[in-house]
Amino acid sequence: MSQYTNKHEDAHCAWCGRDISTNNRGRKRKYCSQSCRQRAYEARHNLIQQGLSPDCVVLTQSDTDAIIDRIFQARCAAEDLLTAISEGATSEELQEIATEVVALSREAERIR
C-alpha cells in the first residue's frame, strides 16, 4: 500500500501570509479569502501597468522596516537560546525560548 503525504501542510496566503486551512483533496489554495485574491490581482495589474514584471514584490519603506524588525527579533531570540544553552538552562527554559524562536521566525516569514 502506498503512503500518502499531505502536500498542503504549511500553506500560507500568497497575499497576507496567514495560515490557510488545508484540504487533502483538490488543488492547493493560494489565498485565504476572496479579498486577498482581489488585492493580489490588483497589485499584479498595477505592476503590469507600470511596466514591471507581475512577479515583482513592491514594498513600502514601512513594510521593509517591519520585515527587518521581525528578522532582528527572531535573531535575538535565537541568540538568547544559545546563551541559555551555554549557561546550562533547564529543559523547560530551553523549551520556552525555542517556542519563542519558532513563533518569531513564523512572524518574520510574513512579507506584508
Image (cartoon, grey):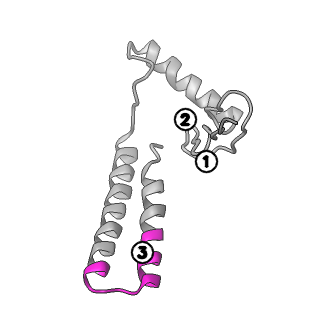
Res. 19 mark: 1
Separation of disc 3 and disc 2 at Cα?
29 Å
User: Label 2: which residue?
Assistant: 14
Under mark 1, the amino acid is Asp
Foreground of the two, 8 or 101? 8
Question: Could you tell me which residue is drawn at 42 percent across and 75 percent down?
Answer: 97
Q: Judge from the rendering whether residue 32 lies leftward or rightward of residue 63; answer left or right.
A: right
**What segment carries the magenta color?**
84-99
Q: Quick one: 84 or 5, which is closer to the camera? A: 5
10 on left or right of 47: right
Disc 3 vs disc 2: which is toward the camera?
Answer: 3
Say if mark 3 contacts mark 2, CB within 8 Å.
Answer: no
Please name the amino acid that badge 2 sits on: Ala
User: SS for tag 1?
Assistant: loop
- Among the two numbered marks 3 and 1 on one chain, the one whose residue lies closer to the N terminus: 1
The residue drawn where x is 46% and y is 76% is 95
Q: Which numbered disc covers residue 42? A: none
Q: How many marks?
A: 3
Q: Magenta includes 91?
A: yes
The quarter of the picture where residue 80 lies is: bottom left
Question: How would you rate the neighbour count of disc 3 (Cα within 10 Å): few for under 14, some for 14-19, many for 20 or more?
Answer: some
Query: Which of the labelled discs sits on residue 97, or is there none?
Result: 3
Which quadrant would residue 13 be assigned to in this image? top right
Q: Earlier in the sequence, mark 1 or mark 2?
A: 2
Q: Position of residue 53 (x, y in %)?
A: 40, 17
Q: Which SS class for mark 3?
A: helix
**x 41%, y 15%: residue:** 50
Q: Where does residue 1 sit, x and y in percent of width and height?
A: 70, 36
Badge 2 marks a residue whose secondary structure is loop
Q: Alpha-carbon neighbours of circle 1 within 10 Å: few (<14), some, or many (≥20)? A: some
Residue 12: x, y in percent? Answer: 57, 42
| For residue 39, above or below residue 12 | above
